[in-house]
Image: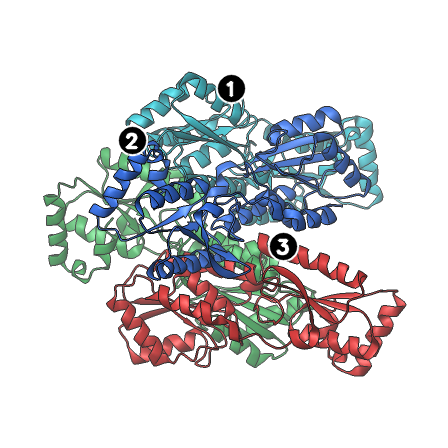
Chain colours: A cyan, B green, C blue, D red
């Protein structure tokens, strides 16, 4: 994969990419399949544009924030990891005024936070996109208290404008000190673990699609799955972040959290 | 849910369903949401037809064999359970002539077997639909040996015409005794365990769909997800088993197993 | 169990305990088996002393810091949870100058930190008892770098005098900024999850010991397991924190981390 | 490790072991640490006796049936795997006359079966040592029914004289057909999976013990842990199967299953 070269500073320059191209030719590489997210595809796009080298990309990022595919490889595994962790927290989350803040990955996107929030019955989900203020959150929590909501889990995406789980917990406590707060920051454990069945099947389908695509002459595209159908999507469009499609999840999370 | 009554013999008679209807009215139940597979929906369909009672069904079966939805609630969890089990078997599956047969659920359908077969890189998958004979299987195994395939996992759906994993292992050994065989029968452990994130989100979406469907006057339909869109599908059509859509998975399993 | 009453403020007064005793007599309770740690046993000891009520305690705390038993119920499960989490972090811990700080439970004791540090091959373990300074830690890390140690995991017990994982990571970075740091705070997820086999067997043995102890007239003792033998240990001594026995683990952790 | 050579036929002859010794000398190996069970230690014992080569053994077998140590490396992990599997089966084990037979490893010893039987609250445990007949089992089951025991799990060690789980299930059904039976055969999945924290700490302690033992001149011994203390035990005695120490577990299993 191109991963390591993409992280290499030299590859960010045209000169560096010319060297990479040279190396590919010398090693008689016919084509490249790159797996990654925005950074990877941007590098691949430039290399392909400058040299004409055939490259197909596969969407591999736990954040699920690529256009041109409904699911990225790794997203399903990461959400299962988060759900297992929250389940364990919930085992002790019986006390009435105790709030558990769980920070999950998502610098710019709330896919992990929203899906795991729905799955774990979180009382609130703080995504980078949502615009929820601390006061909004306190209002939601008080509403949950009033309706005898037993859950006391708040999922926070790391990229929330108000800060990470620790900062938000502190701010909530400052506004309403009846809540005793506890914080878990999952961090990089969301990037590891054995892949789920769905992620492996997805990766297998896409791997086959990459090879078949190259054989049939496709290049500078990302293989994706949209509405359960394999599609090829130009790099230029794939690197645009996906943000608009969370409405349905937001609506469901709201219904279930009340 | 209607589950327990569906398993009750009395419910199979019109008289029994009349009593059930009576009980619903006495308890001032406005509508029913039933979760299950063919048996559940058949009962629900008859009750609805005879009494006009509003019922919406949700697809809940690990076999994924219902028409009208791409995924049933429970399927994703069951496939993860199988994959975890096979991963553990693979840890010791290093010897060259040792074959591991793993029997998974699927009396009439090979969805679990095929998806987990792809995910675990099985050398062969025996589904009820595939028509693979013991001789076919031995040929595939010898081919795998010839190409130095390291995997030695064979996934067997319980409903294969040649029998379960034990029977098939015995028959393979009878044809070609160079293979030492080991058998795992996963059985009911596939029906349990904590649900995966995807299953919980699916169930949440469908639960919201059921309530919203009932509120908008829908009845005698199953809520499903097709191409990632919520759809409502008449009970009559949902109970028809899904069998034809495995072509893509079969093709991929074949490519990857060689 | 006495757990809830132990957490109740009233129970901290003699008056409150008299009421509890009254309630026990009215409900014709013959004896109590209490499960917990120091707080629970202190309450039980006082109640027993003041009223003569027969009570036997079982050691139930994930911290493993009770005298009179080699293992407490819950410790084994918690360490497995931590090890699983660190394994997932390690999957991405390949980069050379990236350090992963994992904060585990242990306000006054380093049992969880030391055992999981050994189990995961951590480059360093920061326990409340160890007296390791930030400069000591940086020295260890540089030593690890010099010997091409691939691990980059530092386990931090929450009760370390220098602060939690975030504080320590920040201080390390301030001293030597070649390290890029990442932090995971496991928090309450260590208190939940399905119990391990060893914990269940331990709890079963102790449960039998409690009942048999009460039947044979024992009271005001904690049932424990020392050198794999069941023993009964007076409450007075059990509540003394265990601290001195970590030498062997510390020695092994040091050997393995180099 | 000596594992591969121990499985090699040549190593069973004095000639083969002489060659192995030669190879060790040529590669300037100073000493051997072998990990395994009876077979491994028998080979190591013979090699050491014939050549004087310094060898220390570590007990590595999931069966826990070696003398000279309370626990073998792998046993704790295997029992956790079994308990997780049985927990999943239990999730659906609600029906009253349905019996779930789970076959676990243990050709000559019932350690895994007994410990997991206690941990999962099995209604009965069939070990190779117990001498329980089919009629005994049916009596126990009827007793459980009478006392409204909700559990319906029977753990069967593969080495039970009456056969594996399938055979025993069939025989029970033949005697008393009110029971509907379901069978799970865990097989080799018990040999894999990520090791538990306790197994890793045990292996670390023993690894250190092996190296320290060799440095201090010990040889032809197995390092073991007895009553939580490191001990060295002659190969001759370690290979004698451990069978007599299950009394306590059998007693507890009996008390809890009623």
User: Which residue lies at the image location 53% right of the left edge and 55% below the top edge?
Assistant: B84
Dot 1: element: loop
Q: Report whether residue D12 is seen.
A: yes
Residue B212 image point, x, y percent: 28, 34
How many callouts does the rendering have?
3
Residue C44 image point, x, y percent: 37, 44
Residue A254 image point, x, y percent: 36, 28
In this rendering, is residue A13 above or below D155?
A: above
Quadrant housing the C terminus of chain A: top left
Q: Please state the chain letter of the residue tagged with numbered disc 2 in the rendered image.
A: A
- Which numbered dot is residue A162? 1
Task: Measure how far apart labels 2 and 3 are at the Cα level.
Answer: 44 Å
Q: Please state the chain letter of the residue tagged with numbered disc 1 in the rendered image.
A: A
- Which numbered dot is residue A148? 2
- Which numbered dot is residue D200? 3
Task: Measure how far apart labels 2 and 1 are at the Cα level.
Answer: 27 Å
If you read the primary sequence from the N terminus, does the residue marked by circle 2 or circle 1 appear first? Answer: 2
Report if the CB atoms under discs 2 and 1 are less than 8 Å apart.
Answer: no
Same chain for mark 1 and mark 3? The answer is no
Dot 3: element: helix
């Amino acid at each position: 994969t191109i991963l390591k070269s993409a992280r290499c500073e030299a590859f960010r320059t045209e000169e560096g990419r010319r060297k990479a191209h040279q190396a590919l030719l010398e090693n008689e590489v016919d084509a490249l399949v790159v797996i990654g997210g925005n950074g990877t595809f941007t590098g691949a796009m430039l290399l392909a544009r400058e040299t004409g080298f055939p490259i197909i990309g596969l969407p591999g990022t736990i954040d699920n924030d690529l256009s041109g595919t409904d699911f990225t490889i790794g997203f399903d595994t990461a959400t299962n990891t988060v759900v297992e962790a929250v389940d364990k927290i919930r085992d002790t989350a019986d006390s009435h005024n105790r709030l558990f803040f769980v920070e999950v990955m998502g610098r710019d996107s709330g896919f992990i936070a929203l899906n795991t929030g729905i799955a774990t019955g979180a009382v609130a989900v703080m995504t980078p996109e949502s615009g929820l203020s601390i006061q909004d959150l306190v209002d939601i929590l008080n509403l949950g208290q009033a309706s005898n909501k037993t859950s006391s889990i708040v999922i926070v995406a790391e990229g929330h404008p108000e800060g990470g789980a620790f900062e938000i917990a502190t701010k909530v406590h400052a506004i309403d000190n009846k809540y005793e707060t506890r914080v878990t920051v999952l961090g990089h454990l969301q990037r590891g673990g054995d892949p789920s069945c769905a992620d492996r099947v997805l990766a297998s389908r896409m791997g086959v699609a990459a090879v078949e695509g190259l054989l049939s002459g496709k290049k500078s595209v990302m293989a994706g799955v949209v509405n359960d159908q394999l599609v090829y999507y130009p790099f230029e469009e794939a690197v645009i972040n996906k943000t608009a499609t969370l409405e349905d999840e937001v609506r469901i999370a709201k219904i279930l959290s009340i």
